[in-house]
Amino acid sequence: MLTEELMKEVRRLEIRARRRVDDLFGGEYHSAFKGQGIEFAEVREYEPGDDIRTIDWNVTARAGRPFVKRFVEERQLTVILAVDLSASGLFGSGEKTKGRVAIETAAVLASAASRNNDRVGTILFDDEVRLFVPPAAGRPHLLRVLRELLDAQPAGGSSGMPEALRTLDRVLHRRSIVFVVSDFEGGEWTGDEPAWAAPLRRLGRRHEVAALTIADPREVELPRIGLIELQDPETGKRVLFDAGSRLARSRLHERAMRDEARLTDALRRMKVDRVELSTSRPFVDDLLAYFRMRERRR
C-alpha cells in the first residue's frame, strides 16, 4: 500500500473508531478501568476526622503541628494492545476476516484510550514479534499506532504469542492493562496447558490482562456443500472434507466444542478476563458489555 493511500485509510479508521467510541462507549471505558492506582497530590494541615495513618511525620516535625498527605486517584492508564497477525487470521466466512476484526478492535481500544488521555502502545506478532510501539499519549502517537495496525496485515506462520508475552513482561515497568487480541489458535498444548500459559500467567502477576478471542461461525458449523478441501493456514496441511456427511460435520462440531472448552478452562484457571468476539457480529457490542461488566464488578 502506498504511503498516501495508507494515511488516507488511517484517517478513515480514526474517524470510524472515534465515532464508535463517542456513540457507544461514552463513559463506560473510563468507568471500567479508572482507579488502577493512587498518586501523591499534596501535603496539607491536619483536620479533625483525617485518617492518622496519612500524617506526614517529617513535615509535622518541622512545622510543629500535624500535616497529612493527600492522594488522588491515578487517572492516566497505560494500555497495551497485543495483536496476533498469524496466518489463521486470514480466515473469514463473511465480510471480515478474523485478522480484520482484530485490527479494528485494537483501533477502537486505542482511540478510547487516547480519548481518555491514557498512554497506549502495541505489540504486533505472527510467528515472532514484528513490532513494539512503546506506550505514549497524544493524537500523533495514536495515528502512529493506527498506521502500524493497518500496515501489518496477517501473514504466514503460526502464532508467536509466548514470545510476545515474554517481551511485554520484560519491557513494561509500569502497571498496564494488556489486551491480547487473537483467535488463540495454533501452538502446542501439554495436557491442559497451552504454550502461552506460563508467560501469560507471569504477565498477569504485574499487569491486568484481558483475552479478546476472535472466532468465525464456520469454524464450528459447515453447510452441506459436499466435498471441500480444507487447509490449515499456519501449517499448510490440506485435507479433503465431506461437508455433505452428517457424521463428518458432527465430528467437526464436537472437536470445535472441545477446543473451545479447553481454551475457556485455561483462561479461567489463570483468572484472565475473556471477551468473545466474532466475525459475524459487531465487536463493539461485546466490548461494551465487557466494560459494563467490569464496572459492576468494581
Image (spheres, rainbow, N blue to C red):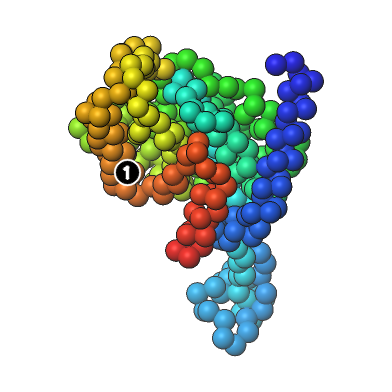
Q: Residue at x 74, y 34 (%)?
A: 12
Report the quarter where the N terminus lies: top right
Asked if residue 66 shows in the view, the reply is: yes
Q: Which sits in the foreground, 268 or 276?
A: 276
Pinpoint residue 256: horizontal percent, then vertical percent.
30, 33
Residue 138 percent location from the top left of the image? 73, 42
Residue 59 in the figure: left or right of residue 143: left
**Residue 155 vertical placement versus 96 (above, below):** above
- Who is closer to the viewer here, 169 or 69? 169
As shown in the figure, which amino acid type bears the numbered disc 1?
Thr
Q: Position of residue 168 (x, y in %)?
A: 48, 34
- 37 versus 252 height, above or below: below
Q: Residue at x 56, y 74 (%)?
A: 55
The residue drawn where x is 66% and y is 79% is: 45
- Name above or below for residue 87 compared with residue 190: above
Q: Determine whether 162 is above or below 298 in the image.
A: above
- Labels in figure, total: 1
Q: Position of residue 132 (x, y in %)?
A: 57, 28
Foreground of the two, 162 or 191? 191
Q: Could you say which quadrant of the image residue 38 lies in?
A: bottom right
Q: Is residue 137 visible?
A: no
State the residue position of label 1: 264
- At 30% from the left and 18% from the top, the residue drawn is 241
Q: 6 or 36: nearer the eye?
A: 6
Helix, strand or loop under label 1: helix
